[in-house]
Amino acid sequence: MRSTTPKTPLQQGIRDAAPFILVVTPFAIVFGVVATEAGLSIAETLLFSIAVIAGAAQFTTLQLLTENAPAVIALLSGLAVNLRMAMYSASLTPHLGAAPLWQRALVAYLTVDQSYACSVAAFERNPSWSLKERTTYFFATCIPVIPMWYLMTLVGALIGESIPESFALDFAVPITFLAIIAPMMRTPAHLAAALVASLSALSLTWVPFNLGLIIAASLGMITGAQAELMLTKRGLFK
């Protein structure tokens, strides 16, 4: 007879985040390969992933540096790509803001797209969870993802140029974000923000140093905020 015992937040977190291993693995390998090809040592490549844990920002910064962009532009672009983490933090604060300082510091370090997406969805499904259960779930979502990011970055750095181009591992980048973002497109404001950001990014590809992405992201956020405000005034958004 199948057991009906409810899964603990620890088990749920690991289970919910485990599928992301399929996209984190090639994503991290690609970064390791690209970083070593760009001239970083194996140690520098691994330290980059450990310090930042943000693939999109890491790729953006690395690409700009290899294109001889000014270091300030590369750093600002990386920070701009990671501005979504500030929004993630604001969204998680009502759920995890009462945790001890050391836990909040660890949450800040471990907040990535996967841990955020899983946690917010789980917190909405389980409003009766205690603070301990919420923090346990959040940290559990990091168990399959974060160590794999470190490990596969190292593997990619060690492999270097030996991976055939026919493997096309760069598919992991868009698939990761599609898997995370698509289920979150639940309101007209979300759709408006995504549409404006996408069209703007496509039309601003000519802007040097990939700054068009920053402009597009800003336009998308402004559009989403304005759409949400308008819908709220009309009583269509709560």
Image (spheres, rainbow, N blue to C red):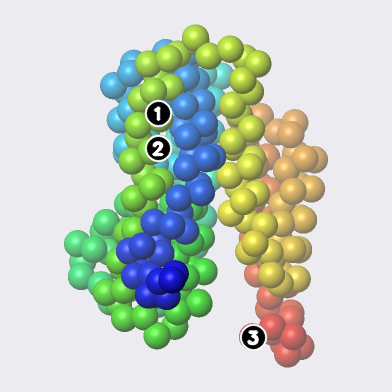
Q: Which mark is residue 153?
A: 1
Q: Which mark is residue 238?
A: 3
Mark 1: give few (<14), some (14-19) or many (20+) Cα within 10 Å.
Answer: many
Quadrant position of the C terminus in the picture: bottom right
Q: Which mark is residue 33?
A: none
Q: The residue tagged with tag 3: helix, strand or loop?
A: loop
Which residue: 47% across, 27% down?
29
* 52 versus 191 height, above or below: above
Q: Compare marks 1 and 3 and give the one earlier in the sequence.
A: 1
Which residue: 20% across, 70% down?
100
* 208 versus 113 height, above or below: above
Which residue: 74% across, 34% down?
205
- The label nearer to you, 1 versus 3, is 1
Confirm or deny contact between disc 1 and disc 2 (CB under 8 A).
yes
Please name the amino acid that badge 1 sits on: Thr
Q: Nearer the viewer, residue 80 or 92?
A: 92
Question: Residue 234, percent across and down?
Answer: 76, 88
